[in-house]
Amino acid sequence: MNLAIFRACAGWTAAFLMWSASGISLEAQEAPLPPEPEAAAELAPDLPAPPDASAAPPAPAAPAGPPNTSRDLYDGIVLIEAANLQPDYINPWNAGAQGGGSGTGFLVGPNRFLTNAHVVSNQIQLLIRKYGDADKYAARILHIAHDCDLALLELEDPSAFEETTPLSIGGVPTLESTVTVIGYPIGGKRLSTTRGVVSRIDFQPYSHSGADLHLAIQIDAAINPGNSGGPVVQDGKVVGVAFQGILGAQSVGYMIPTPVIRRFLTDVEDGHYDRYVDLSVGTFELINPAYRAALGLPNDGFGTLVTTVTRGGSCDGVLQEGDVLLAIDGRPVAANGYVEMEGEVVDMNEIVERKFKGDRVTMTVWRDRATVESEVELKAFDPYVMQANQYDVKPRFVFFAGLVFQPLDRNLMGAHKIQNLEARYAFAYYVQEDLFLEKPDVVVLTSILPDAINSNYGGFAQTVVSRINGTQIRRIEDVYEALHPEQPPEYFIIECEGHGMPIVMEGSRVQEAHERVMKTYRVGTDHYLGDKQDQEKETPGTEEEKPVEVLEAAQTSGGASQQ
Amino acid sequence: MKQRSVNYRTWFGAAAGLWSLGLGVMPSGAQEEAVESVESVEEERAGVIESGVLGGFAGAVLGGDSGSLPDEGAVDASTSLLRVNVTAQRYNFYQPWEKGNPGSRRGLGALLENGRILVTAQLVSDATFIQLELPATGEQVSAKVEGLDYEANLALLGVAEDRPAFLEGLIPLRLAEGIRTGDSVDVWQIEDNGTPVTTKAEVVDIDVGPYFLPDVFFLTYELRGSLQYRANSFTLPVVREGKLAGILLTYSAEQQASRVIPAPIIARFLEDLADGDYAGFPTFGIRYEPSTEEQLRSYLGLARGQGGVYVSDVSPESTAFRAGLQVGDVILKMDGHEVDARGNYRDEEFGLMNFSHLVRGGACAGQDMDIEIVRNGEVMELKATLERKRPEDYLIDPYLFDRAPRYLVMGGMVFQELTRPYLEIFGNQWQERAPLKLLKAMQDPASYEAQGREKLVFLSRVIRTPATVGYESLGHIVVKKVNGREIPSLAALDAAFQQPENGLHRIEFEEAPKVIYLDAQAAEYWNGQIQQAFRIQDLRQLQ
């Protein structure tokens, strides 16, 4: 059930990939293939025009070969080399491990390169290389969308690409139509192309965040580490961005389709990425005849049951548990939650997926045996981010006399391999049971660096902290404040869930022990509570500042290790 | 390592070490290994007293006039042991109307007075057929269980057929008394051809240690000595000077160490059985932590060198609970014995030992016990009346043998009462893999008990029928109400299903989808259909 989805970014991720690449070169295009030209031709007119359609005629430079060859696009397809810093959630005061990788990107407008978020996440330096050009050009992130794994880059000096024609964005290719993947995957240094057909169009988990589902297109062209962020092309237009595959499966690669790409590009037009909006409701297939009879609904296959309405989500106060959703934006909702859209049957969330923060949807609801019309304003739902992989944030923590306190999130769960039942429960039910209202941060005592002051408390590792000196702990800041009162108390009393016995430390001994432990274990700084810049990292200004800050940290750590 | 047995955790139901009740047909070697690994997991932190005992019997000889007993030395494995062949079949907790594959086990039983044969309870758990075999001749007879305690891991067998002469010529063993650390004992085995085999071993430690069930601790002897397993194993008698000193509980070939259920526990078990009304070993019902940490002691107002253990949890309706013990109390004395900071007291017989033995070693249910505690800096006296909390008294049964799990099938929906063995069907890693909600309920049953629940009734799975269409994916969700009634037990669920509203059953769950409906008539109809298709003998098992 849990497929290992990998992201096709070369470099450190490549180590665990065991795929044999079966790249089909462009020379093989004469080989007989399924009837893709007609299908594609039929589809094209139905699609909305790409924003930059006028600026994207096929490049004139194609010497041989038939028209519409992908070869014309090569100039706009770039290699992206990223140096990054993987944050250290075990020793959060350290800068983290330096690494690097490479992926692919492509020009979508003047000095605008599109790639995957995972190619440039946690980056400290980005270099872009042009096809057939030995030089590397420094680049920076303009916008990054971790929820849909896309990023927009720009060059510090755009002159190298002034003559290059941007690629144009096409539509959704039909099943069985042929597509070409172009990029810089493992297996060689120069540009590579592979070709395959569209195998499936469906909602899929996006492994970069680990908590998002969006439309994705499965293709059987080889997608390998390094292909990430590269264009998937049909008839000279981009129909997707190659981004992930499934380890162990054969000929299964995924690309981000153009509705998702367009949504990202539109979202950032105002200079800020707002993230996906969400209904924040749970639904249940309403097909049992007895259930329908109990609700007074005809057995006609329409209407899906609302089982949870998340507090603070878009539908809070509008929908109720037990409501039946009959229609969204005028489109009838089937019992299984699907709607018909542009001739295809898709998950009803696809209606919301194409909307933006502040947009509205209308809903027809069956409640108490009557129809109710309502409307909600869509917004992003922040608390779920705790359950998603996070990037470009420094781990928050409080270090106190050998005790390490950290807020629970997906990164922490993975790094510490947390087994503690209360912590696992809080993570899994954080949104579902509205735990976020009570505790914006679930603070975990992740580890204890042994010292005379704490040596008997090793058994408390990985437990959820409930109170410190009587103060309920609702966020990491509470920990810092409770442990740093104006006058040190006689005892610090730390209570943890599942432990009837508290941790007791004598106030008079703590300061000395704290300094001793920091020195012994080389703990450079004793807390980081996050800052506003982290929370609004999508704004371009802060993006520029962050790498510098992280770089300094990296140098400090490098210096220390040489001593 | 010496102190490992001190570190108990939790009474039943807390997330203790990994324990798979893989009793089936494992070769005895594998079984021992499994037990050993549990022990190492148990080491983590402080623990629980499950029970305790106090009974001053110090190696009581069991009843029976001993006039006919022969001189010591005249007995050996061939005169006093029987082979015990067991066929066992465990219920399938996933499809509770079925049993799994039958398996067989072999062990040795020690003949006691009155034609009773002593074996471990583990050997006969879920037994469907038990046979005794004379080692010398191979002659066989059916046997029945006459007394059994899974916690103490002891069972008493008797001949089931009317063959009074079967045991003739065999010599019953008496129980040894006064075994001490340093004593030499013999482990008895029998070759296939009936020849007795004796292996020497030394008692290197006497302390409280884990038994066969999770979170159950009793007095044990630890032996050092290399054993070669013969054809039979599992239950091996340990003898000193011709008297039964105990029954082998585990053996680790790597460490050449074995652990033994000792004579004092066996004596207590036999005494209790003798009056025909088996009360079992009392349980205390706390979890505790050592108070060795200086800062903690100073905070609690404990003097240096004073001892005492910190009560970190009290099981509802337990002995300790009824005595008024609270979380945060520090136990200084039990039954007049000082308890040190690690939880040990000085036993007149065995020396330094975990204080759980005071409740679960020699004491009997109904006995009173004085407890001295410190609460908020004040020394207080509490009086406890020892009781036994039976497995069925827990919200979630910690173990279950010899009977079917309780279940009820309605139209294809399979409801059960949660038990620990149910969670264990998720495999060796069940504490990671089992549904979080159910694990949480086991770890912290108090919130459910506060709702007046006797048992935790949940939807286990859904068999596809036209009545359950759309519900196939549901499972492992706790039932709140059915047809408007609270569901404290499976019997209550059965009663609630007698009262549909407007021809529909309304079933409310703790989690999404919160509510579902079943057509009462359709459910009845499909009950009959799946009963045939799945060969379900009974649609409900409420006993």
Image: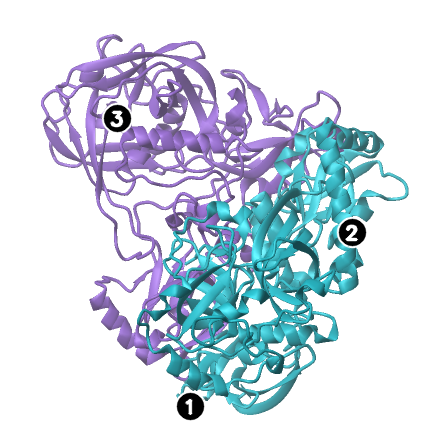
Chain colours: A cyan, B purple
| Residue drawn at the location 9% of the way across and 22% of the way down | B137
Q: Which is nearer the eye, A311 or B340? A: A311
Mark pair 2, 3: CA separation: 60 Å
Measured along the vertical axis of the image, is residue A123 above or below residue B37? below
Q: Going 41% across and 85% down the picture, which residue do you hit? A: A301
Q: Secondary structure at mark 1?
A: loop
Q: Nearer the viewer, mark 2 or mark 3?
A: 2
Mark 2 belongs to which amino acid? Glu
Q: Check disc 2 and report its element: helix, strand or loop.
A: helix
The answer to whether residue A100 is above or below residue B281 is: below
- Res A430 → quadrant: bottom right
- How many neighbours does mark 1 have within 10 angstroms: few (below 14), some (14-19), or many (20 or more)? few
Tell which subunit mark 2 falls on: A
Asked if residue B145 lies left or right of residue A369, the reply is left
SS for dot 3: loop
Q: Which residue is mark 1?
A: A298
* Nearer mark to the viewer, of 3 and 1: 1
Label 1: chain?
Answer: A
Spot occupied by residue A404 in the image (x, y as percentages of width and height): 70, 40
Horizontal relation, residue B61 to residue B353: left or right = left
Question: Observer-nearest residue: A280 or B537?
Answer: A280
Rounded to the nearest angstrom, the CA distance separating label 3 from label 1 is 66 Å
Tell me where residue B345 appears, x and y as whole percent. 58, 22
Categorize mark 2 by other alpha carbons within 10 Å: few (<14), some (14-19), many (20+).
Answer: many
Type of residue at label 1?
Answer: Pro
Inter-mark Cα distance, 2 to 1:
53 Å
Residue designated by label 3:
B233
Tell me whether the residue at label 3 lies in contact with that at label 1, contact meaning CB atoms closer than 8 angstroms.
no
Which mark is on residue B261? Answer: none
